[in-house]
Amino acid sequence: MRANYEDLLLQKDGNVLTILMNRPEVLNAVTDAMLEGLGEILEEAAQDTSIRCIVLTGAGRAFGSGADLRGFAAVHSTGEPIKVSEHLKKYHRVIRALRTLPKPVVAAVRGVAAGASCNLALACDMRIVADDARFVEAFARIGLVPDAGGGFFLPRLVGFGKALELAMLADEISGPEAERLGLANKCVPVTEFEATVQKFAQRLAKGPTQSYGLIKELMNASLSSDLEASLQLEGQLQDQAINTADHREGVAAFIQKRRAEFTGQ
Ligand code: LHQ
């Protein structure tokens, strides 16, 4: 992994890698460099056994404000038809990496998470949020449709009708409301936010990492499969899980009435 990435900062604490989107003066508006860095880091983290949990967060008072809008006016001024689908592939690489990374990824959201930044948070496995969090599917405010995976994750997290409401009205959802809707796993006062995120991530980083990767694969598949396919897959994945060192350790710890010491193997 490189030491420096444009518009991103990395922090490693034990087995937890924290990725900060780092443009606080524009609430971490997303750039191409940010997306390329995220793709590269996440793909490399998949191979790095010293990383057992990833936290995605924003520097300063926000998680992120979506695509950087400042270049948009210039694009429109040419009068030519605009095609953005090629550009969106940069987001898609990151979303695929988040979903296929065989380790837990936690979005830590304080302040605003708007547009594509909101949807990057939704593509993570879990969301810990501060009570000052503001989720906003900002797209309809500027006459666009949710991108960066929002059309997939939003209805699956909050249900179909609520997803349509959030996408069409583009109203802000507070941290406590996000928790109530199932958009956030946990909402805490902003004063407790950083400590809560670290505790949560460190706990995941001490877990049975291989099993977490397989759990993720099983849950990912459930988003687009039927019962028969899921039952088939659980058998294949359990064949893998039952042969891990962490499974053996978990059983030994149970028998010996002690806490399991998982190594991620
Ligand atoms: C910003 C931004 C920003 C630049 C705040 N860009 N500077 C779609 C189509 C095609 C290709 C790619 O991808 C996409 C995906 C998308 O994400 S589309 C949606 C893009 N995002 C938005 O529409 C949200 C725009 N921002 C806002 O509505 C507000 O800024 C929010 C609600 C995020 C935050 O409001 P406030 O807390 O009141 O902060 P603010 O508006 O005062 O912003 C602080 C600064 O950040 C300000 O700069 P300034 O120099 O005046 O202090 C903003 O201009 C800048 N900023 N978002 N996306």
Image: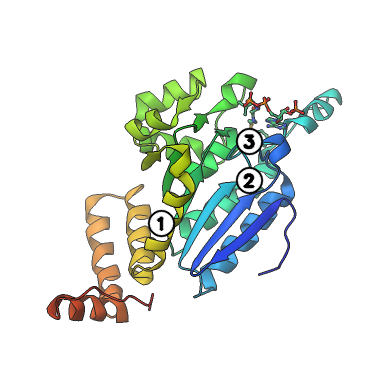
In this rendering, the label closer to the viewer, 1 or 3: 1
Residue 210 is drawn in which quadrant? bottom left
Residue at 41% x, 66% y: name it: 205
Residue at 44% x, 65% y: name it: 102
Residue 26 is drawn in which quadrant? top right
Residue at 37% x, 58% y: name it: 216
Q: Is mark 3 within 8 Å of ligand 1?
A: yes
Q: Position of residue 243 (x, y in %)?
A: 28, 80
According to the picture, the residue beneath numbered tag 3 turns out to be 66
Label 3 environment density (alpha carbons within 10 Å; few <14, some 14–19, many ≥20) = many
**What amino acid does circle 2 point to?**
Ala
Sequence-earlier tag: 1 or 3: 3
Which quadrant of the figure contains the N terminus? bottom right
Using the image, tell me which numbered label, if any, was put on residue 59: 2
According to the picture, the residue beneath numbered tag 1 turns out to be 199
Measure how far apart labels 2 and 1 are at the Cα level. Answer: 19 Å
Sequence-earlier tag: 2 or 3: 2
Q: How many marks?
A: 3
**What amino acid does circle 1 point to?**
Lys
